[in-house]
Image (tube, rainbow, N blue to C red):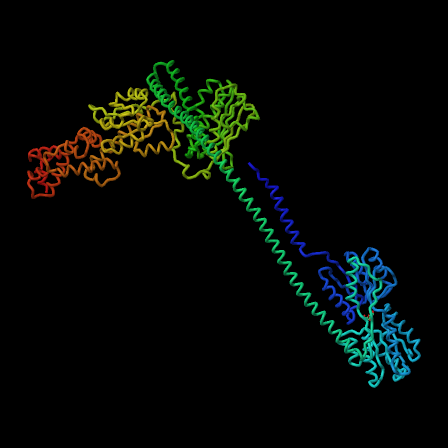
Amino acid sequence: MPKINFIQISKFIILIGFVLFVSCKNDGESKRYKIGFSQCLSDNMWRDAMNHSMQIQASLLQDSLTLEIFEANGNIQKQINQIEKMIQDNYDLIIISPNEPDRVVPVIEKAFDSGIPIILIDRKINSNKFTAFVGADNLAVGKNAANYIASMEEKIKNVVEIKGEDNSTPVIERSKGFEQTIQKEPSVNLIKSMVGIDSVKIKSLIDSIDINQIHYMFAFNDELAYQAWKIVHEISSSNKIKFIGVDGLNGTNGGVQLVQDNVLEASILYPTGGEEAIKLAMKILGGESVEKYNILNSTIIDSRNADIMRNQFDKIIQHQDDISLQQKKIQEQENTYTTQSKTLRLVLGLLILSIIFGALVIYSWRIIRQKKRELELINKKIIIQRDQIKTSNDAKVNFFTGISHEFKTPITLILSSIESLTEENRKRDFKLLNELGLIFNNSKRLLRLINQLLDFRKIEDRKFILRASETNIFKFTQSIYRDFERESIKRNIDFTITANNEDLFAYIDRNLMDKVFFNLLSNAFKFTPIRGEISINIIDVTGANFFEIHFKDSGIGIPERELESVFKPFFQGSNNNNKPSSGIGLHISKEFIDMHKGKIQVKSNNGTEIIITLYKDKIHLNSDQIVFEPETNYNENFNFISDYEDDLLPVNVSSNNEEKLSILIIEDNSDLVKFLKNKLSHVYDIHVSDGHDGIEKALEIIPDIMICDVNLPVKNGFEICDILKRDLRTSHIPTIILTALGNKESYIKGLESGADLFLTKPFSLAILFQSIKALLYNRAKLRYYYVNNLETINKNHDFGVMEQDFLSKMNKIIYENIDNSNFSVEQLAEELNVSRVQLYRKIKAILDIKVSDYILNIRLEKGKEMLKNNLKLSISDIAYSVGFSSSTYFSTSFKAKYGKTPKEYKGKF
Ligand code: FRU
């Protein structure tokens, strides 16, 4: 059969998942370059324009690059740090607009040396270690300005030069280009060169030179030029100075607008190069070779082309906006596409996975179904085998239990015979008495062993119910101690019992605890040699809610390694010298102690010590485990050397000496029957049934008492008892059930069947005699009640319902026929559906009266009542109406019963 390799399948699924994940993740992604731009200055239009043009270009290439702009705000150190950081962060390319040509050189060289391409923009440095430069030619800017002024119509042109304040290469080069050019132009005079301007500087200039002598002012950018224009016009609104700037930016207050507004005469276009720098960067990163110097064109913007320039610029801006918009849309579509393609792949992936899983599930299901079938088959086989084992085991155990029960009857017989023989020979034959003692003690031992075996079975079936009663622990233990005293004397064993509190009471199941103590002492005596020591010590632990009982002997002890096994069933000590032992005594003892929630421990040191710990109170017990038992007479076992009490001897309880009371014994053990017959026949009339015809015999004889065994052929004792107790003819007969089953269920079953008494084998003959006597006495009491309550019998429910019903029915029939002088006992029996003899015996048994007398009594009672209540009726009328054939017979009978004639009785009223 193919085997599922779950690990391989899992690996396969994980692999597929990973492939799908990676393919989704990389979807549409190629290498993106990281470009950094170090911008030296900020907060001015031209720099903003440069940044903006770079960003626009970068956004067009956003799939290929990310641009990060760092502004140094004119702080050289800050610019150095920012470049340093870009090196550390592994930027793919760095664009730098250096603040000044010298101090930034080391960090730029470091970046370059580390392999990062460097693009310088707008400004240069005093080093060759950079990849490319992009920007306009500042020498040309200066030159263009000079040539422009020279081309003007004035004959003489006096010019003031206003330089930027920083030490950047544009400042240096523009100045150089301008000054070198005007030197060659005789019409142009440089009358003043200034660095930066403010109103103070302009005022001092005007103070030194007549303002009308200044024709041109050339400022190094449009912003400076505009400032100069404002200051000059504040001082003199009528001046004729023409201002020329650099940058030619589009937008508010940009060079183009200033020219259009006639603020500036002209502005030299100085392109920022932002767009070109990004393009150049991508070429470098794409591995293309590029020019080192990429010079941008500059041109002059004046009133002649300002409008065109503005239009051009606006169009460019418009185009840029359009491109941005397109770009955005493309981007959106790209995003949508990417998302859709990712989703599609994911769905595809999941579909594949579902198919794989589905296939796997079907495959697994089929395999599981196959396995299940196999398991079911194995299970069936196991169940069959288990049933076979159970049947065979049950058969063995039932046989074992049955045979154990069977043992009990012969032993009971032996014990009862001995009791009887002992009694008879008590004063005569001492030797025989000894022999009998031996038989008795050994029979008892045998019985104990059988009981132990049956207890073991009961423990296994969990059939024991704890019945704890408050018990004087010392007295209880002492009663068991006494059973062993004789043995201790015989073997010269120092056998003692001590207690620190002889008045200690605790709740124990006496029956179970008796077995435990007896067992422990039997073991102690078994393994203790002659002249050894055995002690029982009861310790009431002060302040604690428990007490201890120590059983200590000086016997062979138990090897250390076997101590923990002693309470296991069938344990045999390795050193017990093959002394016969069932190995269940200690196990049963532990089970019984456990039922009491107590503890049993064993120690071995110069002998064996068993310590039992039990609770003093009853908190650990359920209410149904607590019973009341009188404290006295803890040891109810028959002791061989004990005195019979006289009143236990059989006595004739018959009320009538001429007629013996009858007993029906239903028992299939012929020995027991023989024995009972022998013992009871001189007092009672004995009838016997072996069980086959128990019911028939009972109906035939209507005995005064029945003794019935439980284990019988055809019907068991409970069933027989039940049938007879439901039959009107026999319901009144007291019944004793004899059984070997000593458990509560049997007892309840016995009571349910209506049995009056329940004797467990082995029973003492004396107890049986006493029980018969007590039952007959009870019946006599009942009879007395019936006889004296004839009138009220219908209303009283305290006595046997069956008997009461029977009597009521009988009374009813008699009353119905009260005026019928021919009404006979036969007729009554017939109407009651019983035979004449059965009726006779039943009425004799419950009322101790003949039926004919009973009918007569009722007639007389009725007559008496009529005499009292119907004064108008004549005595002979009354005699006829209560069934007397003659008034004379009525008078005679009446006088005999009530001591007066009817006439005398009537005369009273
Ligand atoms: C702006 C600016 C421009 C000029 C350029 C020279 O910061 O002064 O006006 O053209 O820098 O680097």
Quarter of the image for the N terminus: give it. Answer: top right
The quadrant where residue 337 appears:
bottom right
Q: Percent position (x, y) of residue 626? A: 41, 37
Residue at the spot 27% in from the left edge and 32% down from the top edge: 723
Above or below, comparing residue 627 to residue 553 in the picture: below
Q: How many marks?
A: 0
Q: Percent position (x, y) of residue 351? A: 58, 51
Query: Of 830 and 778, which appears nearest the observer?
Result: 830
Picture quarter with ligand 1: bottom right
Above or below, comparing residue 598 to residue 436 in the picture: below
Left or right: 286, with 641 as reference point: right
Query: Of 61 and 462, which appears nearest the observer?
Result: 61
Query: Of 554 and 135, which appears nearest the observer?
Result: 135
Q: Percent position (x, y) of residue 796? A: 24, 40
Quarter of the image for the C terminus: give it. Answer: top left
Q: Is residue 312 visible?
A: yes
The quadrant where residue 54 appears:
bottom right
